[in-house]
Image (cartoon, rainbow, N blue to C red):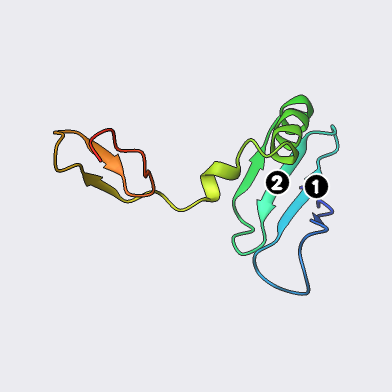
Amino acid sequence: MVRLIWRKSSFSTGEAANCLELAADPTGTPRLRESDDPEVVITMPAATLRAFLRAAKAGEFDRMTQRPLTVTSCSRSSGPRPTACSSCPHE
């Protein structure tokens, strides 16, 4: 079995267990793992990793880290609306 050399993300600090690590196998295939669960390794083609990193840098996944809106019902409508929305057509 080949021993992989794992590199931590530059955003990781110290010895915290919340680090993303990257390695390449002998064929150059990228492998990702999270340091707090190092037995789980994600393997993907290099082109897929490049596309993922471009999307992450562009903020395409930012909405996934935002808190979900609480949904309430409008007193004059049968449908739900987010409480953060102040533009209820009935108010």
Q: Is residue 33 found left or right of 65 in the rendered image?
A: right
In terms of depth relative to the viewer, which is nearer, 20 or 37?
20
The residue lying at 64 percent from left, 42 percent from top is 42
SS class, disc 1: strand
Q: Residue at x 73, y 42 (%)?
A: 31
Residue toward you, 15 or 84:
84
Residue 25, horizontal then vertical, whole percent: 81, 40
Mark identifier at residue 23: 1
As drawn, 38 above or below 87: below
Amino acid, disc 2: Leu
Amino acid type, label 1: Ala
Q: Position of residue 24 (x, y in %)?
A: 82, 41
Classify residue 21 by image quadrant: bottom right
Q: Quadrant of residue 90?
A: top left
Q: CA distance from mark 2 to mark 1?
A: 7 Å
The residue drawn where x is 84% and y is 32% is 27
The image quarter in which residue 82 lies: top left
Relative to 57, is 69 on the left or the right?
Answer: left
> Outermost residue, front direction?
91
Q: Which mark is residue 32?
A: 2
Crowd band around label 2 with a 10 angstrom C-alpha radius: few (<14), some (14–19), many (20+): many
Q: Residues within 10 Å of mark 1 (few under 14, many from 20)?
A: some
Q: Is residue 12 left or right of residue 77?
A: right
Q: Quadrant of the C terminus?
A: top left
